[in-house]
Image (cartoon, rainbow, N blue to C red):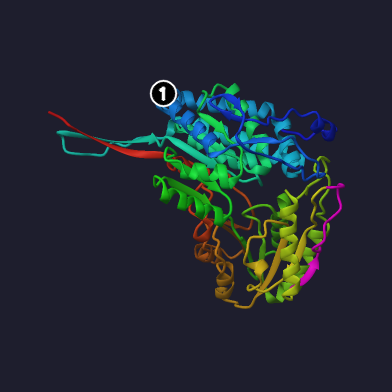
Amino acid sequence: MFTATGDDWADRAAALSLHTRMFIDGSWEDGTAEPLAPISPRDGRALPPIAAASAADIDRAVRSARAAFDAGVWSRIAPRERGQLLIAFAQKIHDNAEELALTISLEMGKPVREALQTELRAVVNCFRWYGEAADKVLDELPVTAPNSLALVTREPAGVVAAVVPWNFPLTMTAWKLAPALAVGNSVVLKPAEHTTFSALRLAELAHEAGIPAGVLNVTPGAGHVAGRALGEHPDVDVVTFTGSPEIGRRFLGYAAASNGKRVWPELGGKTASLVLPDADLERAVRASADGCFYNQGQMCTASSRLLVPRAQYDSALEIAAEVARTSLPADPFDVSTSMGAIVSEKQLAGIAGFVERAEAEGAELAAGSAERFSAVDGGSYFAPVVLGVTPAHEVAQREVFGPVLSVIAYDDVDDALAIAIANGTEYGLAAALWSTDLNAVHTLSRRLRAGVVWVNCFEEGDMTIPFGGVKGSGFGRDKSLHAMEKFTDLKTTWIELS
């Protein structure tokens, strides 16, 4: 079981040995593009430069993945054997969880306790789950005429490119890698520029666990260089991507302009937390505010819009403001910290800009400000903000990706207007509904245009349920057995019997 200790995490971070080279075909390789220059958001200090992949480096990685796939060292071994190696990989991650958690905290500002107890726990669970599921993907035997035999088999697609974000760097990576590997694909992983160290260490652990060379390659680099090269590469069969709508749509364009590869995009969200008049207001507001501020608000499912009946608006604003004032950021290396640093100065400036523009548009500022918060000298910190807004405000329409909660009042007692507000953005990833009325829950949850709907809870679930959205949030699905379908091809074999 994971436990955050009282060790001096800062001293341990200073002693970390960080990988800075690409991992291709089981070896550490130099990159030929301009190196990445990461900065720790905890205190603003420069971290070691990281080798970055050019298009030529991406080609090397893809060729390595294709060679491993064609050789059958992974794609054609028994599914049970693949599963056992994924479970061994999960154990390696478990055994090195503190190092990985500290690396994540160092490179993107997540509290080390959260990285250890939440993120790493999820990563280990994910690889174990798909390891156990590897031999449970079944083929089909349709009923045909007596003189024929039809087989419908599920075969690995080939080479998968996984392009992942920085907010949950190893969780998102596990959601992509585990199902793709479980069904026999080879993978080229392009981690986010902010969170490359943890991805490189993950690749090393996979190799130590026995996953053959070439099956998992990690190619750090700039999105417009390495990411684009993967999207355009004619020998990549599938791209799985989590990130912004703008970049996700670029990948669809790359696919169309190259080999028509499948692209599975998950493109962010603007979650509405809809509180009905009969709900427990205190519980609903506190859970929604926590859901907005968790991970410094850097979540695609962050409950950034709180919709309440107009008669309860003032009370909701007050409760949310109290949560904000007691959820201040602090040193992510302190084991008592629940809110850490914003991933970068650029991201912090973007969040502050949303708050400044909201105030200029007439939003009511109930807690926080657009000013930088002082937690650790040189670091990027931002205190939670609560705003009273209308649905038309920019901050209520666009994804902030920071700890900014928009509280919106609605009037329609029949909830039609509330549903219209909840569905009234380009996104459709997640939503929450708070009510004790079973009829309302059944009726309204179906009218919410979202891939995930939580009722009287927030951010709950396990590996058995699919995760993904609709509308502008894309159509990719992670988690569950359904995720494995993305990485397989159906083959029909028809046999005439004499």
Asked whether 174 falls inside the magenta stretch, the response is no
> Judging from the image, what secondary structure is the residue with disc 1 in?
helix
Quarter of the image where one finds residue 440: bottom right
> From this viewpoint, is residue 316 visible?
no
Q: Which residue is more in the foreground, 304 or 452?
A: 304
What segment carries the magenta color?
363-378
Say if 208 sits above or below 326 in the image: above
Find residue 251 and report its horizontal and vertical position in percent.
49, 50
Q: Which residue is more in the foreground, 440 or 162?
A: 162
Which residue bears the numbered disc 1? 71
**On the rendered structure, is 209 left or right of 320?**
left
Q: Say which residue appears at 83% left-offset and 41% top-offset.
A: 334
Q: Which residue is more in the foreground, 56 or 121?
A: 56
**On the rendered structure, is 484 left or right of 201?**
left
Q: Which residue is more in the foreground, 138 or 384?
A: 384
Quarter of the image where one finds residue 292: bottom right
Disc 1 crowd, CA 10 A, few/some/many (<14, 14-19, 20+): few
> Main SS of the magenta segment?
loop
